[in-house]
């Protein structure tokens, strides 16, 4: 029995009690709805003001927010399914996992692009308007989706070529390792993540802004703090890539508390990074905060 099969067996063997299962699902659903509600407010504010969708920085940010909403919705659905239905048809699971993989890979790529834009704005300010345009930003977003979808579809094609036809008529515990079980896919995904070179991008832009900030420029210091938040968010997102190895370690260390360990990992890996995006621009960005406050005040004021 491989590690993936062992993980699924333990999950099915050590089932949570009804009370614990309800509590976990309520926590995940409430957090998911809350984060998506906040993000919906950010999207509404963005769409209502031309100032934002004519600025590449905010276009990249709102793409990150939309991507987070899609990913949050998918992870909540997959979490609830794992408790209520437990096993679903492979084709349905494939569709959910493909979109989940794409949005997961979109996040670090989008964060890297935002870090580069921040670096250009601070370190090469005279060329920022020429380099960073809305059209180029939209093309960049298209490239991000093309890259992530190509990577996810490659997993599907490998599975179609290597798994028997009966596999696609079966039901599985819906997670990446069970619906795409071929070892080639795992190796391919490791290589793909290495090729992204996201870490190099983040470190390069961060240290350049760090050195620029020594000039005591207020904007440069604020940019440095923003990059630190991007780096922290990226660190949390990158933990998704080591989730299978982490699950195997947790299975060996805490076999009887494995489901509780997975729940904690789910909150840290899937939920926490989605909650940071609103903080970066809602709380720290003066312009966005000003317009968001107007939107909230209008919502609360009597008609």
Image: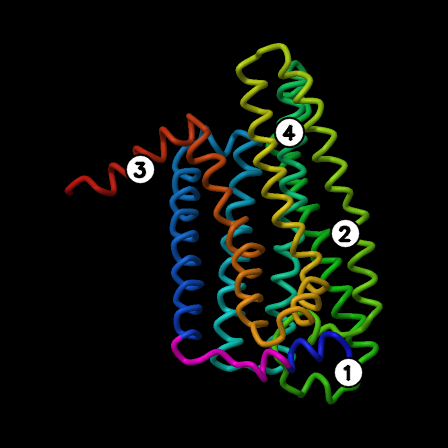
Q: Position of residue 83 (x, y in %)?
A: 49, 77
Which range of residues does the magenta coloring cover?
A: 10-19
Most extreme residue toward the top is 215
In the rendered image, residue 176 lying in the magenta stretch gets the answer no
The answer to whether residue 95 is left or right of residue 180 is: left
Return the residue at label 1: 1
Q: SS at mark 2? A: helix
Q: Position of residue 11 (x, y in %)?
A: 59, 78
Return the residue at label 3: 295
Q: Earlier in the sequence, mark 1 or mark 3?
A: 1
Q: SS at mark 1? A: loop
- State which quadrant residue 204 falls in: top right
Return the residue at label 2: 193
| Numbered mark located on residue 215 in the image | none
Q: Position of residue 289 (x, y in %)?
A: 39, 31
Q: Earlier in the sequence, mark 1 or mark 4?
A: 1
């Amino acid at each position: 029995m491989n590690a993936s099969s062992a993980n699924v067996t333990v999950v099915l063997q050590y089932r949570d009690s009804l009370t614990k299962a309800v509590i976990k699902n309520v926590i995940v659903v409430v957090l998911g709805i809350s984060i998506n509600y906040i993000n919906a407010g950010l999207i509404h504010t963005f769409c209502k003001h031309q100032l934002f969708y004519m600025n590449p920085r905010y276009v990249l940010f709102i793409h990150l927010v939309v991507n987070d909403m899609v990913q949050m919705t998918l992870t909540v659905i997959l979490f609830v399914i794992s408790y209520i239905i437990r096993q679903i048809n492979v084709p349905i699971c494939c569709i959910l996992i493909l979109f989940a993989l794409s949005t997961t890979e979109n996040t670090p790529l989008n964060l890297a692009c935002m870090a580069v834009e921040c670096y250009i704005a601070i370190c090469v300010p005279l060329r920022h308007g020429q380099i960073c345009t809305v059209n180029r930003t939209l093309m960049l977003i298209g490239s991000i989706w093309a890259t992530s979808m190509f990577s996810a579809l490659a997993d599907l094609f490998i599975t179609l070529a290597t798994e028997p036809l009966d596999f696609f008529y079966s039901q599985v515990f819906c997670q990446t390792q069970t619906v795409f079980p071929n070892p080639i896919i795992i190796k391919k995904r490791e290589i793909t993540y290495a090729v992204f070179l996201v870490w190099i991008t983040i470190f390069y832009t961060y240290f350049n802004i760090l050195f620029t900030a020594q000039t005591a420029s207020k904007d440069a210091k604020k940019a440095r703090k923003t990059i630190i938040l991007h780096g922290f968010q990226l660190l949390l997102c990158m933990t998704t890539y080591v989730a299978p190895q982490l699950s195997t370690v947790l299975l060996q260390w805490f076999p009887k508390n494995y489901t509780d360990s997975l729940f904690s990992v789910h909150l840290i890996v899937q939920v926490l990074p989605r909650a940071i995006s609103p903080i970066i621009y809602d709380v720290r960005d003066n312009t966005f905060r000003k317009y968001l406050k107007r939107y909230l005040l209008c919502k609360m004021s009597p008609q």
